[in-house]
Image (spheres, rainbow, N blue to C red):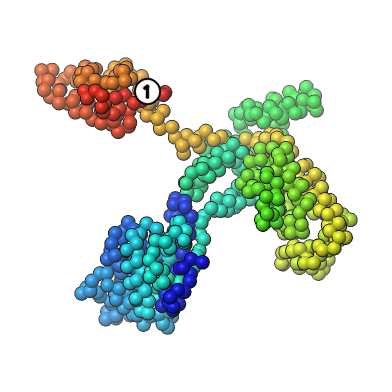
Amino acid sequence: MPLIFTNILGSHRDARISTAIVLPGSNIANHIRLFSQMKTELDALPHVHLVSINSKDCVNFKMALNHIVKHLTEKNNKISAATTATTGDKEDEIRYDKRLRYDLYIVADWCRKLVKSDSQLESLSDMRVVISIDDADSFDVSILSSLLKMLQSYISHIPVKLILSVATSVEVFEEKLPRSMIRLLDGQVINACLNDSLTTILKSTIFSKFGVQNLLLGPKLFNSLIQRQRQSLESIDVYISSLKYAYMSHYYSNPFSCLHLCLDSDLQTTLDKLSDVLTPEHCRALRLLGSFKFQVEKSLDQITPEQLETFLTDDNHLAYVAAMSLQELAYYKSHMLYTLNFLAAFLGAIQDEHADAPNTLPKPLRGITIVDLYPLIVGGDFLTTDVFKELKVAFANSGPPVLAAALYELFNSTTPEKFSELMEKLQSEEYWPIILQFIDFGNEGMTGEDKDTSSPMTFQPIPGSFKTREQITAYAKLQLRVAELIFTEYISNVLVENSIYKYFLNEAFVVDSSNLQENVFVPTQRAAIEMALSNPSHYWGGTSTNNKNDPHLCLLYTLYRESSVFVNIYDWYSSFQSILYRDPDVDPTDDAEWEKKTLALFLQGVAELKFLGIIRDSKRKFECVEKLVWRGL
């Protein structure tokens, strides 16, 4: 156990500072969001006064104390002003003009007067002065030690509590502090890493099984976003921005995104809304979609040539087909997302069952989460993967906790039509009485008047029901039958081949282009710079027939491209001066002024090219600069 949590050398617990050791994880980009949420929660609590300090603002011990005193004093002045306005009593105002600004007696008096003036506070123990050290690892040890020692000496006068943010680990942080300082802390670890925040956001948006959203991310775009998030140290805010941009670009650039508003549970209502929205231009565009081509090819063997001609030319018939397809898409989407959450639920239960011996779990199932399942299911590849095959086998060989997790997902949430059919089929099976021997539903009377609908069923394994050989044999047969029902008769029928892409108008519900995301969030700076330098007219339109409007930097770059590896600086300047546009209205005899102007422009351009990393000073030839970049290489 770390020494921070050990009462060493007889230090009394009341004499130590209550300290929260917050472990925010190594991803520094996520710390801003974490600390912001934490401070918002603390500020909302009554009688809690929070002060945040960091190593950048506290370069020495006095500055750290001054920051604490100043923050609390400013807050106190606002409180005093409000009190004075209501009571008219100016004698209670706290003034510390004659004291040093880093004197902690100021804070002690502030706490005492606050307790005296607030009827809800009976003693100092009813309030908290929380000092949050956001980057404890980067603090100088001597400054941090002096601060801890000073705060501990005032613990009977100031109800101080500490929050230490440690990005490494408690053990590493402990090695930095002297033993005498560790003795002053009464620590408690809070693991506040935001590693699972991405999954939490996805579960409430993209993975929502209640179909709150109409737009789905395709596997290509989804994998691109997840891969970039996993391989970089970017914060979760960057992923949220990428997600927002994907939605925005789809709704603003896809003319069929308006079809979402036409979707209704009733076919006729959907058709009426579509008739109001679809124009002849929309219909012509619909017939150019890839999903329309797939729909026609699929229908060739089922319709006559006359019906096919109607499909290709009659806009009213196309609207009817589009209305049916929208409803089919919504139906399949709800079942697909529910299946995703259903699979993830008992996959997590299977992984928990093998937590003590992870090597006993098949390799395809190790570490896989709902984030990995999503692109496989949306892309229509899930049924052919090893994950599906191994998951079916693992479920059939699992114990009652896994079966309980599957039943919980089935019976404790709003289920789509096919899931309701699966529930009814399970209850009608001859093995259903056997399930009741192994699983406690936690809500007596699943059917009948005694059923308690106000409390959810818990579905917990019954202790002691899995011991005898007869029980084990009966459960093995039961689990095989349940696996057959879930995987073969349900999931294999719901997650059809080609998945959502086999439906007409899937382009309105799925966004799967990662090129736009990559260009925006991972821009190709070099190509853009090269284009701007070599062809500036590309950005302002038109064509340039002379050098009159070209920036002087572009002229320098043009000469640069025509030179060898080493560019003689005088020759470069002479060529630049000769092609630079000279206003004919200026006195042509004033060469001195022209020389100054061209030299200034040349030196400025050379400095900018050096800043861009295009050239550098040559050590071999002092009169030259060295060429570093060739276009396209």
Q: Residue furthest front?
A: 9
User: In the rendered image of this protein, does residue 55 appear above or below residue 317?
Assistant: below
Nearest the eye: 411 or 275: 411
**Residue 433's image quarter?**
bottom right
Q: Is residue 591 left or right of residue 425?
A: left
Q: Residue 23 placed where, x, y %? A: 48, 59
Instruction: Identify the residue at horizontal 72%, vertical 67% (top origin).
Output: 454
Q: Quadrant of residue 174?
A: bottom left
Mark 1 Cα within 10 Å, few/some/many (few <14, many 20+)? few
List x then y, in percent, for residue 262: 64, 42
Q: Position of residue 125 (x, y in %)?
A: 43, 79
Q: In terms of secondary structure, where does tag 1 sit?
A: loop
Give the answer, above or below, for where 12 lies relative to 485: below
Q: On the rendered image, what quadrant is the C terminus found in?
A: top left
Residue 29 seen anywhere in this rendered image of the structure: yes
> In the figure, is residue 364 to the left or right of 473?
left
Residue most extreme to the right: 430
- For image coordinates 58% across by 40% down, the residue present is 223
The residue under label 1 is which amino acid type?
Trp
Along the line of sight, the residue nearer the viewer: 509 or 225: 225
Q: Quadrant of residue 64?
A: bottom left
Disc 1 target residue: 630
For residue 252, side relative to residue 9 (left or right)? right
